Image (cartoon, helix red, strand yellow):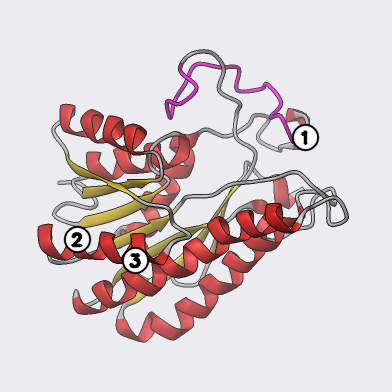
Amino acid sequence: MGLLSGQLAVVTGAGRGQGRAEAELFADHGASVVVADVDTENAERVVASIRDGGGEAVAVTLDVSEEAGWEALVRTVEADYGALDCLVNNAGVARSESITDETVDGWQHVVDVDLRGVWLGMKHAIPLLRANGGGSIVNVSSIYGVRGGAGDSAAYHAAKGGVTVLTKNAAVGYGPEGIRTNSLHPGYMRRPMGPGADEPEADGDENAAPSHGPPVEAVPLGRFGRSSEVASAALFLASDLASYVNGVELYVDGGYLAA
């Protein structure tokens, strides 16, 4: 029996990378997974992989910043499954511009996907979770949802900081209804290399510096993270192993923030 046996989970941005790792791990643990991504082809590829492994999944095309897409996703869940147990708000985008270099359009795009998308996901998932007697929401923030970094990527920091506090707001507001809401804060992940870069465990040098980040010596564990390790943390928060965990910030960063 898996940790999510018989449950339904929605994972956004699940067409590649970290979202794919989360979707596939959830399916391995018995969940039926709604693989939601703006890239339909990638979402369908992940669904095929899950089904090949004996799991259950369905692909849904979703731009998380558009409310109509969330309304359509809810209709799919209600028609095909009738209930929802877990939402992983994983989809996100980033830009490297500073406060003074950022454009209005660039700022808005990042905030729309990274923060508005999380709000819309909770807005439309919470009624389904409530009707199911409770459940779990995992909002993927970042270590830069709690610190200022190097003074660049202003829109990303602002959006992820918003996700961190919005998560706590939901944890307090909906905890009495049995809905647990927690934020997940990945640190620097290893940079995938070669033709398998879209795979959750692509071959690559785990100590190769990310395109925008510190040297590996800055991480107390002495290496960068893997998508599978973030997915395992998401699985913990989604499962009954975390049944009394609500409103927390879970760092998956190798100790980077502790240094």
Residue under the point 77% across and 54% down: 103
Q: CA distance from mark 3 to mark 1?
A: 33 Å
Q: Which residue is mark 2?
A: 77
Query: Hey, what amino acid is under mark 1?
Result: Pro
Contact (Cβ within 8 Å) of mark 3 with mark 2: no
Q: Which residue is mark 3?
A: 136
Residue under the point 52% across and 33% down: 226
Please tell me in which quadrant of the rendered image residue 20 appears.
top left
**How many neighbours does mark 1 have within 10 angstroms: few (below 14), some (14-19), or many (20 or more)?**
few
Q: Nearer the viewer, residue 126 or 227?
A: 126
Magenta stretch containing residue 121, yes or no?
no
**How many neighbours does mark 2 have within 10 angstroms: few (below 14), some (14-19), or many (20 or more)?**
some
Contact (Cβ within 8 Å) of mark 2 with mark 1: no
Residues in magenta, as a range: 196-213
Q: Is residue 120 left or right of residue 47?
A: right
The picture places residue 78, in percent across and down from the top left corner, at 16, 65
Between discs 3 and 2, the one toward the N terminus: 2
Of badges 2 and 1, the one in the foreground is: 2
Magenta residues, dominant SS class:
loop
Query: Hey, what amino acid is under mark 3?
Result: Ser
Q: Which residue is mark 1?
A: 214
* Above/below status of 222 relative to 131: above
Contact (Cβ within 8 Å) of mark 3 with mark 1: no
Q: Is residue 164 left or right of residue 35?
A: right
Of badges 3 and 2, the one in the foreground is: 2
